[in-house]
Amino acid sequence: MQRRDFANPFSRTRKKNRWFEKNAGLYKNINQKKLHKGPPAVYIQYKFQLVMESSDDDGDAHTAAFTRMLFVLVLLFPALQKKTTDFKPPVIRTVFAEKPPALPTPPVVQKKKAPVKKKKVYITFDDGPNKGTKNVYHIVRDEQVPVTFFIVGEHVFASVGQSRMWDSLKMAEQIAICNHSYTHANGRYEKFYNDPEAVVDDFRRAQDSLQFDNAIIRTPGRNIWRIDSLKFTDIRKSTAAADSLQKAGFVIMGWDLEWHFDHKTMRVTSTGAKMVESIDSIFRTNRTRSPGHLVLLAHDQAYVQSGDSLELRQFLQLLKQKDEYEVCLATAYPGVSRPLADSVVVPQ
């Protein structure tokens, strides 16, 4: 066998090595047969040439057969490689079942809250018209709060200003006017109530003079109630007079809470905020003559001064902020809404 000189740079093997490195540039050592990068066809082409040279030198039949097989593989390899690279995996599509149509949502039925029954407050002013009535009138009109004035007959005719004030009260909206006697007992209450017949006459005189459109009255200097079955008398000696007034057809309304004032200074003794707290306390402890109904007594003459007028305004504003309360006229109190013609009995 012919010896191959690998050290000779002009030997056939060395020339083939240089040819491969020049054309492929892909291998570090041909003898190690190590593929680093590039397509496999370059390496197979090189081996084919190498085997062809070996077959020429050795002349082995097996080598010739292997050479032909390699030649065929070299011819087929590009086609196989193309088919391999052109292969695309089948696309698998997932078919989801369509969602069934959504059922219509039933309408949401909201339960209506039962209306909360509000507590009723009846604000009343006694002894007008007098020096403080004008202030009270303007305050309640500004605050748009319904109130009731219990009028003294003599006070209406005492002066031109008081008569005009009476006319303003009659024409005003959200204001009720009721009978508070004609003379206000002249300040002598014990003597006044000792004569029941004279008491009835005094209230009838006020009714005839002022023509009230309701039968509601308030007794001067006494907290007396006579409304249907509701009966209360603070001083027993006044019981006979109170019963006589009821028999005559009058409806007597007393009070559950009084806004006191100093009779010497004519100034209120409590703030508006304190009065609201007192109303809360009375309702909370159920200390009213009729459950859920509170009658407040105040006096016109206690609001002459600007400071007292301010307390009245603040009281009304605070009361309006209470959602649990409703301010009403005295004519809306339970049991008093009777026609005047069916109530007051006028003697023949």
Image (cartoon, rainbow, N blue to C red):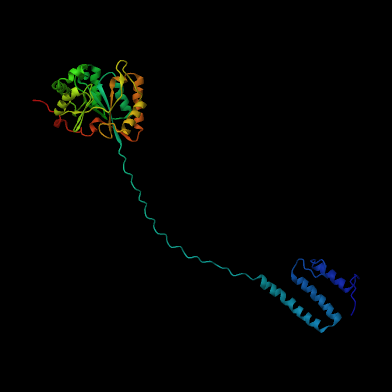
Please name the residue shown 16% across and 27% down the image.
Answer: 243
Near-viewer residue (269 or 150): 269
Find the residue positioned furthest to the left: 348
Q: Quadrant of residue 278?
A: top left
Q: Is residue 306 left or right of residue 205?
A: right
Counting from the top left corner in percent of width and height, residue 38 is at: 75, 67
Find the residue positioned furthest to the top: 264
Q: Quadrant of residue 320?
A: top left
Q: Quadrant of the C terminus?
A: top left
Near-viewer residue (222 or 22): 222
Height in image: 34 above or below 179? below
Find the residue positioned furthest to the front: 236
Q: Is residue 195 left or right of residue 12?
A: left
Height in image: 253 above or below 59? above
Counting from the top left corner in percent of width and height, residue 2 is at: 90, 79
Q: Is residue 133 visible?
A: no
Height in image: 340 above or below 83? above
Height in image: 6 above or below 114? below
Q: Is residue 50 visible?
A: yes
Q: Quadrant of the N terminus?
A: bottom right
Please name the residue shown 23% across and 31% down the image.
Answer: 331
Counting from the top left corner in percent of width and height, residue 15 is at: 86, 71
Counting from the top left corner in percent of width and height, residue 172 is at: 26, 27
Q: Is residue 151 left or right of residue 140?
A: left
